[in-house]
Image (cartoon, rainbow, N blue to C red):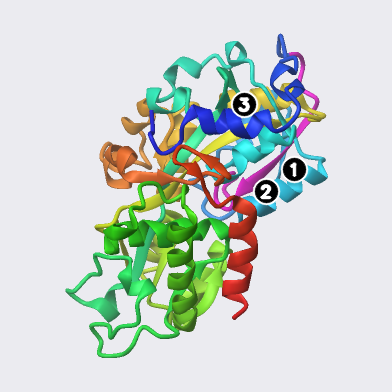
Amino acid sequence: MKTFLKATTALAIAASFSTNVIAAEMLKEIGPGEGQVSIVAWAGYIERGETDKNYDWVTEFEKSTGCKVSVKTAATSDEMVTLMNQGGFDLVTASGDASLRLVAGGKVQPINIDLIKSWSTVDDRLKNAAWHTVDGVHYGVPYQWGPNVLMYNSKVFGDKAPDSWGVVFEEQNLPDGKTNKGRVQAFDGPIYIADGALYLKSKRPELGIKDPYELNEEQYAAVIELLKGQRSLIGRYWHDAMVQIDDFKNEGVVASGSWPFQVNLLEADKQPVKSVFPKEGATGWADTTMLATDAKNPNCAYKWMEHSISPKVQGDLAAWFGSVPSVPAACKGNALLGDQGCATNGFENFDKISFWRTPTAKCSTGECVPYSRWTSDYIEVMGQ
């Protein structure tokens, strides 16, 4: 089990809300589909072949189940939480910095894993992961996971590829002889504070940072100071994957934290882009398909959750997004992913990734700075 996210954290969050959430009755059997299912998802997560006909895991599902899939793309975890709070959706592909907030807020319901026939095929490292499991109750089905990589312009860096996040945090001249000022990006979301904390964990060991999501006041102040200094380097704070792709192609951006999704699309477009897993490690995401408490189409939703962990879907998605399947069987025999795809995408890096999660005031070290502070302070940093 990933040590960065303890089950006690999940319990602490959920305990601050009504325990009726945990006790909510789960679906006992899957009935006829309602004809539709609506999903809040990250860009690139639900493909029907519109971008590339080879990547389509929606069309066959719709034909076989009669459940028409509609998707609302969200750019950040905060946007996902907002959309689920508004209601009207059946499922959400939530990362760890949103999932427990959705559980605690009563916006998602427990999953009856006995109705997910392929549950036994899920990676053992994910089955009981604390970002979707509270007191032994599962609130979702693992979808995909992966790191936030350092993407860079290979023409600018030449044979001197960056090996540290310092290239986006500290002002410096790049291998092309020009400064990085105005040529780098940072993620437009409070959870990015953890990236700064991870960098300082290595850069300034005297701070004693153990977990980038559990920061005391001194550690937190140092990270905020780093991010304030970074502000003068940032050309744009990104949250839209497609906008970031355009920025690398047309706006002179040469380095940024990113997802493998953008790297793959830029490389496919023959752009001079590569990515690295820096020496300090990386933050990352382990995403879970979660069922809304007020889902109007639960039968189609359960059918989709089962479909979502089929080896074919898992392998195709991993090939498309550059992520890692939640089902190890997908790592072999998939024409799009290839037998080395999982290794390439970081299957063995699981324990090196600091997976996103929502910071709480009560933490394993005692008192930590909660997410509400992260939110207000990061807005202030970006607005400097």
- Amino acid tagged 3: Tyr
Report the quarter where the N terminus lies: top left
Q: CA gap, disc 1 to disc 3?
A: 14 Å
- How far across and how far down the image is residue 274, in percent? 31, 65
In the rendered structure, find residue 80 and report the number of the disc placed on it: 2
Please name whichever residue, 233 or 154, is drawn nearer the observer in this view of the structure.
Answer: 233
- How far across and how far down the image is residue 102, in percent? 68, 37
The residue at which mark 3 appears reads as 139
- At mark 2, the secondary structure is helix
- How far across and how far down the image is residue 316, in percent? 45, 40
| Image-based side of 318 in relation to 82, left or right | left
| Residue 27 picture quarter | top right
Question: The magenta stretch spans which residues?
Answer: 31-49
Residue 134 colored in magenta in the image? no
On screen, 258 above or below 52? below
- At mark 3, the secondary structure is loop
The residue at which mark 1 appears reads as 84
On screen, 352 above or below 255? above
| Image-based side of 94 in relation to 270, left or right | right
Query: Within 10 angstroms of label 2, few (less than 14), some, or many (20 or more) residues?
Result: many
